[in-house]
Amino acid sequence: MVVLATKCYVEGDARDRALDGMNSLVANDVGELDVDWQVGVRDDDFVQVDVTGEDAPVARNVLAETWGEVVAHDGGLDAGEEYVGTLESWDDVGFTLDAGVDVFVPADELGLGVGSPEQVVERFGLVQHLPVRFVYGGDAGDPDAAPSRLADGERDRLYDWQRGDGRVNVNSATRGETRATVNRAGHAQDIVTVERLGLLEQSIVCAEGTDPPGLLAAIGSYLPAEMRCVV
């Protein structure tokens, strides 16, 4: 079994569609290997994939590399190691990530420029449940532990978003649903692609000359989801 660093937090028909889509994505990733798999969701909403067959170790490694993996925490996270969690909340003092356990990243360890965590969220277009890489500092109860921080590669990714032509980031929608919404709103020509960030977190990459806030306003009535712009 591998627990992927992406969540399925919608219910009803939306969950069924998301899991059908996840099954297709797993097939794309490992379908040529000699394995069988079953996609499920843990009580904490993380997606898990049970993999069996001759190539199961290889398949689990492929899925972990593609999606990130929520590791077992029987012995706790290891200080100084890089992990993937999902962005669950933010406030004046920092970010709280879910990596199977809550991990707090203080504001001065975000490394994303000046401003409060709320301002960072708005500036970089961050949405809840976005998979985020971080370096674990240590047990918060240990006075000698270093604070956790965003990984250097994560900071680079977010800064790269700002160097492009703009994005609209979305949660609570699959990639197919997001692309269909852009088409339905008549803005297919205004985007380059829809980049998958997680199962239900997407990034609409704007074409040159497209105004991201304008695109958000145009598609917002078609897509009941949290959306933020990267300008």
Image: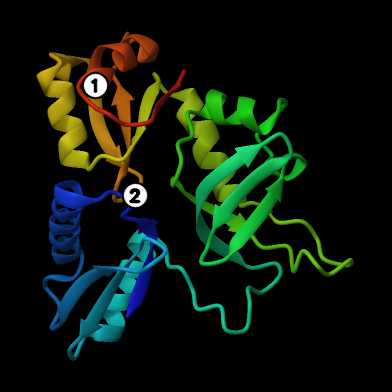
- Residue 198 is tagged as 2
Q: 217 above or below 22?
A: above
Q: Position of residue 65 (x, y in %)?
A: 38, 65
Which residue is at a point 45% across and 36% down the rendered structure image?
A: 127
Mark 1 burial class by Cα count in 10 Å: few <14, some 14-19, many 20+: many
Mark 2 burial class by Cα count in 10 Å: few <14, some 14-19, many 20+: many
Q: 17 above or below 123?
A: below
Residue 185: quadrant of the picture: top left
Which residue is at a point 25% across and 34% down the rendered structure image?
A: 194
In this rendering, which labeled residue sits more in front, label 1 or label 2? 2
Q: What element carries label 2?
A: loop
Residue placed most toward the observer, 99 or 162: 99
Q: Is mark 1 on a helix, strand or loop?
A: strand
Q: What residue type is labelled 2?
A: Gly
Q: Which amino acid does label 1 sit on?
A: Ile
Q: Position of residue 128 (x, y in %)?
A: 46, 41
Residue 223: quadrant of the picture: top left
Q: How far apart are marks 1 and 2 (CA)?
A: 19 Å
Q: Which residue lies furthest to the bottom in this view?
A: 54
Quadrant into which the N terminus falls? bottom left
Which residue is at a point 70% across and 29% down the rendered structure image?
A: 116
Q: Where is residue 170 in the image (x, y as percent from the top left)?
A: 34, 33
Instruction: Say left or right for 225 vs 131.
Output: left
Instruction: Say left or right for 209 vs 84.
Output: left
Residue placed most toward the observer, 210 or 115: 115
Check disc 1 and report the residue beneath it.
191
- Residue 199 is tagged as none
